[in-house]
Amino acid sequence: MRFVGLLLMLGFALGLGRAEPGECASLGQVNFQGDLDLVGLSRTEQEDINSLNFGENPFHTTRIRLFADAPVQDHVHVFTEFLYDDGTMLARLFGGFVRLSDPKGRDIHIEVGKIPLHLGAYPNRSYAPQNNLIGAPLMYQYHTDLRTDQAPVRGEDIVANRGNGYRSSYLAPGLTGVGDFEGHAIPVLYENCWDFGAVLIGTAAPLEFAVGVTNGSAAEPVMGDTNNGKQILARLGFVPAPWIRAGISGSRAPYLYEDLNEDLPPGQTVDQFMQKLAAADLELSHGRGVLYSELLFSRFESPFVGDLDVRAWYVEGKWTVLPGWYIAGRFDRMIFGDVTLSGGGVAAWDADLWKREVGIGFKPSKRLVAKLVHQQSQINVTPPLVRAFAAAQLSVVF
Amino acid sequence: MVAATARARAALILLALLGAARASAGAIEGEVLVEPADLAIRDTSKPNPYVGQLSASARAETAATVDTAYGVAWVADPASDRELPPPPARMDQVGQRFVPRILAVVAGQTVEFHNSDNVYHNIFSYSPPKRFDLGRYPKGKSRSVTFVKPGAVQVYCDIHSDMRADIIVAPSRRFALIGRSGRFRIEGVPAGTHTVKVWLPSSGERVASIDVSERGAVSLPPLGP
């Protein structure tokens, strides 16, 4: 199903790219753009905390995004985006959707297909040329020890995986989890893979709004659905003055794979177990400075061990010091709730962590951004897992 | 009575001098090919990259109708006479666009960057003739920059990545805007040999040398790539 969806979208994209010349002339050109990101690291094996699905990582040496968009008729526009990451040697369809805009010219649109994430505020500046730093906030990428294809039966099953991230498994020797190896561990809110669905998005000053339905969940966007439930998501933004932008987001979706149904108690299905997410975002700007902050709470309902809660927040600032030069910094935190252990007592279901990234950026032109950052992080396992490295990035828009 | 006569005489002498100066000045005419890429600077077919975000306001489709320059031609010789710079020029920000998209000013002239949008803009430039960053400011506010060094200055908005303007800082008032036809005429050029620069978005600066007679117009030879 997933493969068929991918082929359909790819065919759709290629078909538009090969539109008849006359058609292009009458309906508008196909716009192409690219983004090449080159990264060098001071130390290897330190950047794992930034890992994304498929083994991708913004600190890999070469990443390329290719964009193509075209109007297909009045008020209808198609967008496609491909991503290559040299750490995986994989090029994949990142996004592909059709946008229908209000014929009356109001800022109201419907997007259908593999659509951008409309939860939170960071997705609008997640690409390297817009990102003040190189890494993404933890809440948008850090992989917890919670899986979609396995369920912990005892609290100990998930607690034993604290800090394991992508490598987490409840089927390891000595553990009692159920499920298989079809999926993987998940982050809380994931930006690096878009979900398949539809969203109504727009503005009615001073409000911004987005409400949609997708196949996946905030933690795991998908092409083809992995269960019978859909995600409902919404964001409401408030911009009372140009210097302030605030928003609240929420989503609700079953997140477990339907193959787990056979391991659940009679009468239960994976569609009963939700990821519920609530988030708030704030952006303040004054003169040459901008401050961003987001706060998130997510609850994963788990069939055997109850609710698994997590909170996350970050604060990020950017200050332009000279024309073309800026300094930026972000501090991130994730705090995990407790799960009840079978032997009595409670323990955090994953290890709390923090990440700090500071850097300077130089934009000699709008098409060229150079950054030098230092990132330090700590995962509070025993002993604490501390990582630190410096990185330089050159991002070129072509 | 004596004072009034003296003032009238002085005025007559000044008028005579101005007339003589005008009589000894020629003009430079030229025509350049305005490429499709030059016309595309006002292309409105690109989709709005900020849908659903109030950090951007709706685009004003009327902006292009009052903004007709596609390039600038100017005499690049250093100004021989000490001209007072003209009053401040104005560049507006309307519907996520700079209006005018191309502006020509005289060295020493000030440009007021006005924000007419309901959102913040943050204008900056990295161009060697003038580097500046005006920070974020709201609707109704203006911030000014004085351009002292001649040359081409690219202006951007830090918030809206597709906003761009070009300001040509000429050494003197001897410049002309190039319209869609590609034709231009620079008036008031003293007799002698002059360096003329022509700037278009697609080709950047091109240079030619030309002899100008005391009267009449001379045509600029075809410019190289």
Image: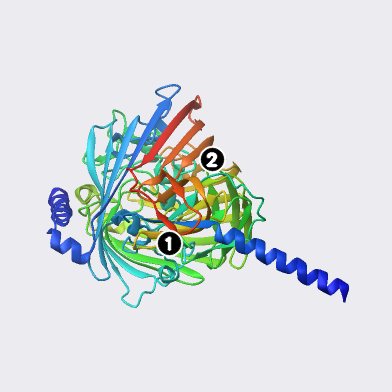
* Amino acid carrying mark 1 in the image: Ala
Residue B179 appears in the figure: yes
On the picture, is B218 further left or further right than A289?
left
Of badges 2 and 1, the one in the foreground is 1
Say what secondary structure mark 2 lies in. Answer: loop
Alpha carbon separation for disc pair 2 and 1: 23 Å
Sequence-first tag of 2 and 1: 1
Q: Is residue A83 left or right of residue A8?
A: right
Q: Are marks 2 and 1 on the same chain?
A: yes
The residue lying at 40 percent from left, 22 percent from top is: A44
Query: Coloring scheme of the render?
Result: rainbow
**Image location (x, y in percent) of residue A246:** 53, 61
Is B163 situated above or below A75? above
Q: Amino acid at mark 2?
A: Pro
Kindly identify which chain the residue marked by label 1 belongs to.
B
Q: Nearer the viewer, residue A294 or A353?
A: A294
The image quarter in which residue A49 lies: top left
Residue located beneath label 1 in the image = B69
Number of marks present in the image shown: 2
Quarter that holds the C terminus of chain B: top left
Q: Is residue A164 visible?
A: no
